[in-house]
Image (cartoon, helix red, strand yellow):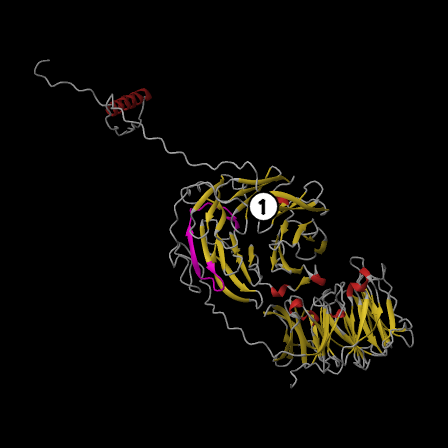
Amino acid sequence: MPGSTPSRRPSAGAQVLILLAVLGSAMLVCGGGVGALVFFAFQPGPQVAEHPPEEPPPPAPEPVPQPEPLTTKPITFEKRWTTPGGPPVKGAFLLLSDDGKRLFAQDGGGVRVFDANTGTQTARIAGTGVPPVGGELLPIGTERVMVTTPTYPFPVVFHVTGTQAGELLPRQMLPPPVPRSVTKFALSPDGRHAFVGSKNPSGGPPGSNMFRLFDTASAQTIGAGFWEPGSAKFTADGTRLFVAEPMGRCRWLKVPGGALDGGWQYPDARVPTPLLSMSADGGVILYAGAPVGLDRGRYVLDGKTGQVLRRLSFDLASGPSHVSADGRRLIEVRDGTAIVTDTRTGIELGREKVGADGENVAVRADGRAVAVRDPTDGELSVFTLKGDPPAASSPLPTPLSPVPDALPPNAFGGPFPQAGPFPQAGPFPMPPPTITPTPRPAPPPALKARWTAPADVGQLALRPEFAPTFTRDGAILLQHGGTTGLILAYDSADGTPLPGYAGHPGSESLGWVAPFADRVASSGKDGNVKVWMARTGAPASDLVFPQLSIPGKQTYASYKAVSPTGRYTAHGRQSPMSGTAGQFRVMDTTTGKDVIEGNWLASSGSGHISFTPDELRVFVVNGTGKAAWYKLPSGEKDLEWGGKGPQPTNSVASVSADGGRVVFYGKLTSSLETNVVDGRTGEIVRPLRAPYQPAVASLSPDGSLLAVPISELRDGVQWHVDVLEVASGKKLGRISPPREGGSDQPIPRFSPDGKSIAVTFRAARQIALYAPRPEPP
């Protein structure tokens, strides 16, 4: 209409508002009652021209250079050997030692140890603390291994080399875990340092759990802090520790001390085990998680900066699982095939059909050997990898992420031992106590050997029955040969070998040696006792032992002893029938009558019976928790002491000549432990805790001195024997084995006059005689 304002078409957003208002009013009217009118206010979008001008398309990105596949694979697989490995068990681990000398295969009841070069089985690890399936095995240096399992409160350590392969070492030498908590361990390759990370059983905010660093030789804490249970691994030289946590934190710690030495923060990916593998120097890391700006998966990281170099897989459970020590190659198992690729480029370098999955494959640290267990029959094979990756001929791929920001110096607290990993809301546990490593005291004066002689011992158990033993007059020194079956004899004055005795060869040789009068008796596991003349080795008349009236084989958990002149013999045996007590008896051989009889609950390798030199009393530890003295020849009980029973593992390492001092293992108070006790009252005179190993300790005849093995790494030697005063604890001297036998525990024994100590070095296969105190030059 002329003169009127021109009409304008409502915008698209206004039309939507009008439409919704109309619809809302109609709903109120149609509802016939009270209703609610709701407006949905959509903001109008920007006005767009109906025909926008055309923009030129963006330039196409330049293609990323892709490496050409190699026509000839530079790495080939060569099968070295194949051998039976026991029944295949789901979840059983397989491990090659870092030095490539041993292969460990779990078999559902223990761990078999093989020579990785030949396939020969050299030992088997089994017993308490060794899980039939699962758990973890960690090499300690080149001669020992530690086995852990969530169902056993302490890790256990075994020898894997030498004559004592497969033998259990004392658990006291290990750093203890936090009670009732999930504990993760890491060991430096040389075995000197241990990482023990635990999870608080009562919960708490992330990162509020405790970890500790230990010196394994002294069991001293050398560092501590907080973490969230994830992964930890030492570098090959043991000077740094990399810790990766599920919440994305990654940090380097100095060893010893635990001071922060770098790190970075990724987003929280909740991956329980972020660190999969690492090169020897930590320069290349195989990581599972979600680095900044990337999805969850497996990645290759620059270990110095945290920059992502390459993505390996979007699947956390698949892809390469091992990076070689030099960081140049990755190894994975896919569809029964082992595949080797170049770490930086991903070029395939070699492959081999091995017919096993990742659970049944182990890789040597340098990436040059692969062990395989056939999942159908348990057969083991070892392949060596020949060849090397070619020199780089293709451009390296562009890193997937920038270098992440480094952690600030105080991201996890100031330099150790200041507290606090980083500020966090909510309750926070108290910081770890200030720990200043104490300077190691100087060792006791070294005791010099009066003489040393070869000792051809086989596998020799760490028990007092296998300690070197003197004849009653001290003129002859005897040593059980273990699995060789020989009884070795020496002139104690100068170590001259004397005619030995062919004892109990083969598997039946693990018994004891007992000099009495002018003779020597020895027993094997079969229970048979042989007797020889001490000077000539000629066979002598047999000893008669008490007969026991309990069922079962006479060799079952049997214990025998003979008095100094042979007048009395003793025999104790545990019953093979559950709920039935065993029996022990002491017999007077001059009359053929039993003078003492009682219950015997001691298990195999435990219990104790010994006589005083005058044969007027006998000391009995029978697994009931009690120790008792009996008078002879009447058999009347004289004294008794001990704790609540039964205690079938009660044992005695040594008794002084008058019985005044006893090295006793048992529960006298609240826990099982070894102490020097008063032999008349059971009162503790001197506790014997780590780093001592008192299972084969020896008391001097008057009970004033103690020779006891001690674990303390010095000059490459782990085990020594310290001689100390029982009353004061003062160390008088130290006996150290040859370096080649320094990882094995020596077994000491005092002479009858207390003026000498004989020591058997099992791994070095030597026996030597020492003075108990430093002698003038």
Q: Which residues are magenta?
A: 253-278
Amino acid type of the residue that numbered disc 1 sits on in the rendered structure = Gly
Does 613 sit above or below residue 262? below
Q: Which percent across, then down, holds residue 499?
A: 84, 73
Q: Is any part of residue 439 visible from this angle?
A: yes
Does 597 sit above or below residue 3? below
Q: Nearer the viewer, residue 23 or 709?
A: 709
Q: Which percent across, then down, holds residue 601?
A: 77, 64
Membership of 688 in magenta stretch? no
Name the residue carrying label 1: 387
From the viewer's perspective, tell me whether residue 222 is left or right of residue 446.
left
Q: Is any part of residue 679 visible from this angle?
A: no
From the viewer's perspective, tell me whether residue 662 is left or right of residue 45.
right
From the viewer's perspective, tell me whether residue 703 is left or right of residue 37.
right
Q: Which percent across, then down, holds residue 612?
A: 79, 79
Q: Quadrant of the N terminus?
A: top left
Q: Nearer the viewer, residue 656 or 518?
A: 518
Does 221 sit above or below residue 308? below
**Farthest residue, direction left:** 3
